[in-house]
Amino acid sequence: MLSLLSLLSLRSIVAFILLLGILLLGAVPALAEIRLEVDAERQWLRGKSNDVTLSLLDEHARPVAQRTAVISVEGRWTDAGGDLQGRELKFGADGVLRLEGVVVHSGSGAFSLQLDDGTTLQASTRAIHPMWPLLPALLSIAIALALRQVLLALTLGVFSGAWILGGGPLVAFRIAFEDIVATTLTDPFRAAILLFTAALGGMVAVMARAGGTRGLVDMVRHWIRDARSAQFATAVLGLMIFFDDYSNTLLVGNTMRPVTDRMRVSREKLSYIVDSTAAPVATVAWLSTWVGYQVGLISDGLKVVGQEGVSAYATFMSSVVYSGYSWLAMVLVFALVLMRRDFGPMYRAEVRARETGKVLA
């Protein structure tokens, strides 16, 4: 009986000691966790200057001030002060360190910081070859030329750009939809363009289904007698619809296409005429959606240089005469139409359309 009591007492003492140890360990303050945040471009181009901001934060997202760290980089990084490898960095009172003009000469973009208390913080960016950003545009152009599918070409171009940006196919899907599609749809300016284009395209389609396009063809048939007059009428109509380049393209292209097809004008020539009387006309017209955008930019520029009292619209109107591309594009269209001069691929397309009746290759 005595031995049993002694055993129970011993167990109680051991349990008490263990419980006391656990409580004491819980009372010991844990070391503050520090994390590193990197504010920089998602992609860095090797050999090109980049700016990066490093921030030290504790577990409560408060800045960790006045710390020093030694940086270790993968590959070779430099800035205005020379090689960055092994350099001692000093964080400010706000826990922030700014590195300007950082150039990644080699390596993937990974780096680490060893703080003065021995803590090592890992971080990384993605450094890619400067030629990679050209791939989406080249891919889109190649697919459009090879398959003649513009929407497919643009979609694959966007996806390839997102792949390069994210570093993998799965991340590319997220970037494509979240950072590109969602951003576009939520931006008021771009969303307005999409809605306007969709509504205008629907109106043109309704007009065509209702017979409006055929009625127009019948109305102008008596004075459009050959390919040159059809091209001239298309160019004139392009000048008349000056308030928006999207409206110009949709209305003129869809309205005059049956007319030019009947007169054996190639679709390539029709596209050229429509394109050269869409944006060029809208950019120099006295009132258009382009003018509103340009006046907004000019107004911001005048504020920067301290000329708030100067009329932005008057400044725009004064600069219209210097819009060399717009004026030359419109003059060249009428010159080619009236002189019946074509060259290069346009000439071959016109010969094909006249001789075989195939307006589209």
Image (cartoon, grey):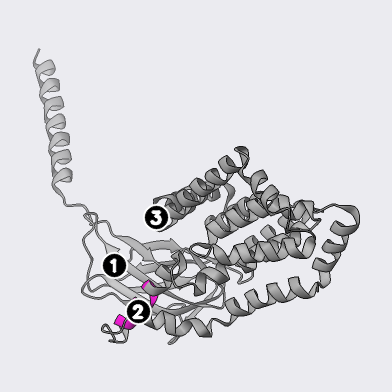
Contact check, label 3 and label 2, Cβ < 8 Å: no
- Neighbor class of circle 1 (other Cα within 10 Å; few <14, some 14-19, many 20+) is few
Report the label total: 3
Residue furthest to the top in view is 1
Could you tell whether 327 is left or right of 294 in the image? right
Looking at the rendered structure, the kind of residue marked 3 is: Asp
Please provide the residue range marked out in magenta: 296-303
Return the residue at label 3: 187
Near-viewer residue (23 or 156): 156
Verify whether residue 299 appears in magenta.
Answer: yes
Camera-nearest label, 2 or 1: 2
- Can you give x and y, in whole percent of width and height, for residue 359 in the image? 80, 54
- Neighbor class of circle 2 (other Cα within 10 Å; few <14, some 14-19, many 20+) is many
Q: Residue at x 46, y 48 (%)?
A: 195
Contact check, label 3 and label 1, Cβ < 8 Å: no
Looking at the rendered structure, the kind of residue marked 2 is: Ala
Could you tell whether 72 is left or right of 167 in the image? left
Q: Find residue 312 and name its label.
A: 2
Secondary structure, mark 3, is loop
- Can you give x and y, in whole percent of width and height, for residue 71 in the image? 41, 73
Residue 132 visible? The answer is: no
Return the residue at label 1: 117
Disc nearer the start of the sequence (3/1): 1
Camera-nearest label, 3 or 2: 2
How far apart are the alpha carbons under marks 2 and 1? 58 Å
Secondary structure mostly taken by the magenta-highlighted segment of the chain: helix
Q: Residue at x 78, y 75 (%)?
A: 339
Residue 298 in the image: above or below residue 113: below
